[in-house]
Amino acid sequence: MDGNRGLHYEENLLWEKEYSDHPGVDLPPVEITSLRTGQDARETIGLPQLSEPQVLRHFVRMSTWNYSIDHGFFPLGSCTMKHNPRLNEKLARLKGFAHIHPMQSESTVQGALELMHELQSWLGELTGLPGVCLTPAAGAHGELAGVMTIRRAHEVNGQAQRKIILTPDSSHGTNPATAVMCGFEVRSMPTSETGCLSVEVFKEALYKTDPNGADIAGMMVTNPNTCGLFEKEILEISKLLHDAGGYFYCDGANFNALVGKVRPADFGVDVMHINLHKTFSTPHGGGGPGSGPICCTEELAKYMPVPNVVKEDDGSYRRETMEDRPTSLGTLKAFQGQFGMHVRALSYMKSHGADGLKQVSEDAVLNANYILRSLCDDYHAPYADNGPCMHEALLTDKKQKQHDVTTLDIAKALVEYGYHPMTVYFPLVLPGTMLIEPTETESKDSIDRFVTTMKKIAQDAQEGKAEEFHNFPQSTPRKRLDEVKAARQPTLSWKHVA
């Protein structure tokens, strides 16, 4: 028996497939000479010796294990895993886009520069923030660019004593990490029982060590927040921050709930990053290529990274340099960011239009509320009584825990039933959280199937099937792992057993 079930392959490591010292290709013998490094010559470079069919089958089989948005529903909360339209891929593969090089003369890539300039215009219009830098290579990189822009502004304006960044306790972990990387001290603000920030809590944090808030550099707030709720007091909070001389950095991870409906600048945002893979459907995950442009006010645009693309009076396009904007914090990345993602994002924007982008956010919010209302009787929905959620629904395992079934058990049960689990144990403001984001691209049929599965899980838990849950998943190539042991005693290398 080889461990296969039907056509669901069990796959060994390549080294375990090696049965001889002969590779799959015949190469002429190499005369062994002394190495310039002074080291002894190696007889092998350590790679397994296999034929081409063996290698090909190995990687194709493993590729069938990858669960993706093209397989089915991917309900990761705060990640916005939406369908990537194939039209975007087609346009990104046009020769004039796919075959250019960043070191070509600008005169030979005017079309690419025009595309980036138009993308800057779209992002500036959608956010209400006219300063746009496309360089950052991912969301966290965009956060870094945004907070570095704030730091540069304070330095140039003689406000280097501002060393504190305010963040909610529900924020993405990258927020405080970014602030610390930029040399700031992080001051956390507790989320209220409504799941949002309150003006009272914000004031306490703002004036904690200075009566005028003169030591506050800014705040990093996600809106809608990571509880799936719109910060209802954000206007007053942002006004208090600005009066104290701080800047409002908005984590743009959840912009898919607002695009075409609300401009972040209108609730006080000074700078934000945009995850093109979340809001504008460029490929997500797999290590990149990501894209996290930043958008900022006209004031902060003087300090954001170079280069961005500018249009000359004669209609041509070029990239800025430090000579154009000497107050800039400088370059953050080689060249101009992930151009292929820029093509895909602009394709998505232009194919939807302003009205289509507005419907995107409306449908995303509608789908999340449909899930919340469908499951709020089966699971604990801590904020359901406060009104509608935004783009994601927050549940907890409070009811299931009474029957010895936890959030992790629910996630493993979803794997058993063919679903990728939602985001679990985040945000950390409540125990046993489950954050579900359907996006606008899921049909009612797919959502209904997911809801039916979640209801079955809740019913089975209530009927006392805890032991069954503790053994899920059963039908996967790998069964349930001891996750604590895996985290504390990881096996990081493979050793051949003769």
Image (cartoon, rainbow, N blue to C red):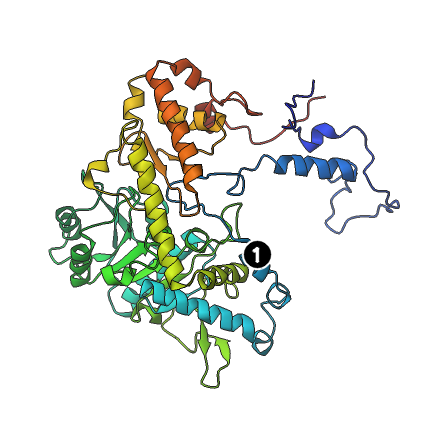
Q: Does residue 383 appear in the picture of this structure?
A: no
The number of numbered badges drawn on the structure is 1
Q: Is residue 39 above or below residue 151?
A: above
Residue 127, percent across and down? 33, 62
Residue at 40% across, 59% down: 356
Amino acid type at image mark 1? Glu
Give the quadrant of residue 152: bottom left
Give the quadrant of residue 32: top right
Q: Secondary structure at mark 1?
A: helix
Image quadrant where one finds the N terminus: top right
Image quadrant where one finds the C terminus: top right
**Horizontal arrangement in the rendering, residue 454 relative to residue 244 (left or right):** right
Q: Is residue 485 above or below residue 332?
A: above
Q: Is residue 303 above or below residue 221?
A: below
Residue 218, percent across and down? 25, 57
Q: Outermost residue, bottom direction?
A: 314
Residue at 35% across, 43% down: 367
- Crowd around label 1: few <14 · some 14–19 · many ≥20 (10 Å): some
Instruction: Give whichever of 495, 170 is nearer the camera.
Output: 170
Residue 272, percent across and down? 34, 58
**Horizontal arrangement in the rendering, residue 224 relative to residue 26 (left or right):** left
Give the quadrant of residue 212: bottom left
Residue at 14% across, 55% down: 210
Residue 228, percent across and down? 29, 43
> Where is mark 1, residue-wise?
89
Instruction: Give whichever of 54, 202 is nearer the camera.
Output: 54
Instruction: Give whichever of 328, 298 is nearer the camera.
Output: 298
Q: Does residue 19 appear in the picture of this structure?
A: yes
Q: Is residue 21 above or below residue 32?
A: above
